[in-house]
Image (cartoon, helix red, strand yellow):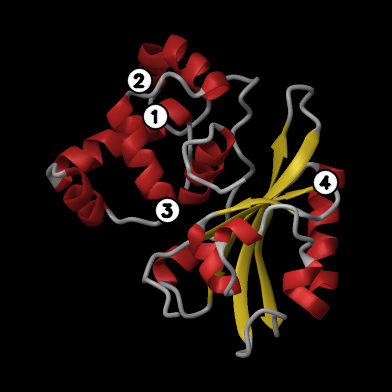
Amino acid sequence: MSMKKYDLGIAVVDRRFRFSGVNRYLADMNRLPPEAHPGMRVDEVLGPLVTEVALCLETVFTTGQPLPNVKLTGQLLTRPDPVEFRQFFFPLRGNSKRVIEVGAFVLESKSSSKVQDSFDYVPSPPNEEGPLNNGHPPNLDAMYRPELARTRETGVGLSGRERDVLRLLATGKSSKEISSVLAISVKTVESYRSRVVIKTGASSLPHLVHYAIRHKIVGLLQ
């Protein structure tokens, strides 16, 4: 099955190294139905490649820090052709701030170089407990400060349309594609995108996807 240009695979893995959920793009990469993944051990898909991935997962569980731009090359148990992936692992924390799951963004080597380049350096996700420091002018942060605090903690500060735009961005859609899906202009899409970036404090596409997963805006099958 051929990959679309901007398809981004997403997986969430629990402490026992079992899939908690995946999106349909990762399911396509693995050549398995999305509903087959929850509860499945990662080694049942990765085979011998699990050694390297398990080390990355354990590192994120232990340190609580993300691991960007991890390359994986070899053979999956679920498909006959050799694969080459670039992966970004990141922690997902519970109410106690302890890492309870690890998320992963996955791109095949044939995917868009523009998207892959965003994996080369991804800073740690914004500290939602600390001061606002997302690269926007201080007066703009001050304008949004009460809503920003609520949005980053609960995810409810986004409007319905902003959530629609974020959901489509997180699944790899371009502004032009979102414009077509939502029947709005590209300029309007960019306006909503700017608001989402301001409200979430995201500094990159992976951060937007991380936020969308955390607040269940992206439709992973669980």
The mark that comes first in sequence, 3 or 1, is 3
Label 2 is placed on what type of residue? Leu
Determine which residue is flagged by label 2: 140
Check disc 1 and report the residue beneath it.
Answer: 198
Q: Which circle marks residue 61 in the picture?
A: 4
Task: Tell me residue 168's x, y (percent).
Answer: 35, 47
Looking at the image, the residue that sits furthest to the top is: 146
Q: Are marks 1 and 2 in contact (CB under 8 Å)?
A: yes
Front position among marks 1 and 2: 1
Give the Cα separation between the discs numbered 2 and 4.
35 Å
Q: Tell which of 150 and 78 is nearer to you.
A: 78
Q: Residues within 10 Å of mark 1 (few under 14, many from 20)?
A: some
Indicate the secondary structure of the residue bearing disc 2: helix
Of labels 4 and 3, earlier in sequence is 4
Q: Is residue 188 left or right of residue 192?
A: left
Q: Which one is closest to the eye, mark 2 or mark 4?
A: 4
Displayed quadrant of residue 53: bottom right
**Residue at 48% from the left image edge and 37% from the top image edge:** 202
Residue contact at pointers 2 and 4, CB within 8 angstroms:
no
Q: Which residue has dot 3 on it?
A: 171
With 7 as the anchor, is 68 left or right in this view? right
User: Mark 1 is on which residue type?
Assistant: Ile
Q: Eyeballing the image, is 221 above or below 110?
A: above
Q: Give the image location of residue 86, x and y in percent.
A: 60, 70
